[in-house]
Every structure is written in structure tokens, then in C-alpha cells.
Image: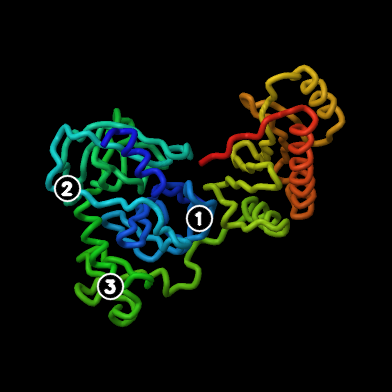
Amino acid sequence: MTIQETIEKNQNSVVQIATKTSTGTGFYLRDYDIIVTNHHVIKDHTRVTVKAKTFSKKLADVIFYDERFDLAFLLPPGDMKDLPNLQLGDYAKLKDGDTVLAIGHPYGLNYTATQGVISRVDRVQNGIKYIQVDAAINPGNSGGPLVNIAGEVVGVNTFIIKGGDNLGFALPSMYLKEALEQYMPHRGEFAMRCPSCATLVTAATLDAGKYCPNCGTKIEFPKLVAQQEAPISGIAKTIEDVLEKLGHDRELAREGQNRWEVEEGSAKIKISYNPENFFIVSDAYLCKLPKAGIKELYMYLLKENYNLRGKLFSLQGENIVMSSLIYDLDLTPEAGESLFRELFKKADYYDTLLMRDYNCLPILKEL
């Protein structure tokens, strides 16, 4: 199998995961009907948003985690059994120098594959073996598959050493297979592994409701606490309240910490808040520059910039973007609702107008 074939085989089964505090990667194993990721990607969350090439954002339940081995499983948000059947590779057959691919979403860049070799097949950290690779693994890759040239999953991309030159580490597939086989008899039920002895613990098997039945370690069982997730507050809560009032699901809109994305008609609107500069920026991505008639288009956009209040047309590469900005202290629920409602309405209006009257081109959708 060529490198290109390996990438194509795996990409449809790789998903992007987002919570209100982070983003990461996961991958679907059809034999188990489970999405695999890292525990640190979904930490403190019982539901996350996932999206893939074959479906837009949906909510998925966290059904298992193992903090020590940094593993977590999600219940697929719907039928995914038509996706390619990724197979777990045999870790025992790996050798230093073997070619591998790390697939994921580094820095939010969808479906990025990096090629490298295994630098050390059995690097031990905290009593656990890891596969050390020189393939570039960056924030957002966490939880994605490390695959061999046969397209088999040989590891779960887990962490990097900051400041190191392509020092990436993946949890070997043997640990993943062990966790899957331990969990499968309880599939659909929330369970976790004891961080001390790795015993699988469910709500029914907890000793006295809070201790591991095998070693007695105190277990903090998230499903026993209603909505353990930290409540969102401040500006982020105001933004989410406004989005929900305007008909958008707050959880599905989340793209990470202080970042949201919604679609209105044919326009895509990205909202971000930077507490360091105190501004909320909303960018509506409309369409692309046409092949001809750009001078007339520019004259129209400049004229509209003069007439518009609180909004501005600009170019990001070949993309036409309409932006608005508001100071965080000015973002009351009423002001936010008025601002976003008008931006969403005008974004859809201008997107249609520019393609109809100025032959602008639709923006390619991210796969």
C-alpha cells in the first residue's frame, strides 16, 4: 500500500473533537463501533462535539476513560459502520526505523498527515511503553492514529516534548487493544479504569459507591455527579446564550476555548474572544473573488464599507470576509443578540448578492 493509499484509507475514519476548552483528534474502529481518543482531550467532559468527512458536527457521549494510559472512548453519534474498517496493528512486530504516519488535526488544520519513522519502539515513560517517532505531532493531533504503511493503527498519538525537534510519542496499540477488550462487555455503559490497578470500574461495581473494588483506591466517578463539567461563565456564557437564542446549539457551535462557528444560509461565521485584548471578533466568510470584474467588485465593497455601521468588508487571501468587533464590556445579552442577528442576516444577504451580481465564487467547504 502506498503512502497516499494509506492516507486515503484512514482519513474518513478520523474525526475532529472539540470541547469548550480544547480540540483534538479521534478515530473510529468499526470492529468495536467506538471512537478512540486521548483522555486529556475530553477531560472533565461527558459530551463532546465530533465531526468527520462524512458528517457535520454532532454530539457524542464519553463512555470510557483511562487517565493513566490517557485513553478515552466515545459512543459514535449515529451509524458509522459504512466507514473504512481500520485494523489494529501488531505492536510486537514494530522495529526502529519503520515508516509511520500521524494523522490528525494539528492547530485545527483538518486532516493533516505527517510521515516519519520510529525513533525508538519502546521508550518507557512512567512505567508505560511509548513509540517515539520523528513524525511531526502538534497540538490538535492528540488522540489521532499512528499508522504503519499497511494502514494499520499501531498507536495513539499522545504527547510531545515541548522544545524538542519532532519528539512525538504514541501509546502502543497493545494497550489500546487491552482496554477495548476489557471495556466491550460493558459497551454503552460509562466505565473507567482505576488509576492504581487498572481494574475496570462501573457505577454498579464501585465499593461503597466510591472505592475501587479491587485495590480500594478512591474513585471520582463523573457519571455519579450531575454535570461535573465546569459551568461556562462570563463573556463566553453571554456569547453562547445569544447563539442559542438565535437558534444555534451552543455545544455544536463550540470550536475550542473562546471560539465558535455557526452557519447562516451559505455563509460561515467564526466568532472568537481574546481576553487579553478585550474584543470579540466575528468574521463571516462569504465567497471568493471572481475570475473577472474585480475592479467593479472592489468599488462596491468600498462603497458598502462607507455605508455599513459596525461592520467591515476585507479580504483574507481570495476570500471575502465581513467582520464586526465589539468590546467585551459592551457585550450585554441585548447588544449581543442585536449584533449577531444583524451580522447573520447581512452575511447571508451579501453572500447571495456577491455571487449573483459580481460572479463571486463559493468558498470551498472544509472536508
Residue 291, position in %: x, y? 68, 21
Q: What residue does disc 2 label? A: 91
- Disc 2: CA contacts within 10 A as few (<14), some (14-19) or many (>=20): some
- Disc 3: CA contacts within 10 A as few (<14), some (14-19) or many (>=20): few
Q: What residue does disc 1 label? A: 49
| Vertical arrangement, residue 177 with respect to residue 205, above or below | above
Residue 2, position in %: x, y? 28, 33
| Vertical arrangement, residue 13 with respect to residue 206, above or below | above
Q: CA distance from mark 2 to mark 3?
A: 24 Å
Q: Which mark is residue 202?
A: none
Residue 316, position in %: x, y? 63, 27
Q: CA distance from mark 1 to mark 2?
A: 30 Å
Q: Classify residue 79 as left or right of residue 179.
A: right
Q: Amino acid at mark 1?
A: Thr
Q: Classify residue 47 as left or right of residue 243.
A: left
Q: Which mark is residue 185?
A: 3
Q: Amino acid at mark 2?
A: Tyr
Q: Secondary structure at mark 1?
A: strand
Q: Secondary structure at mark 2?
A: helix
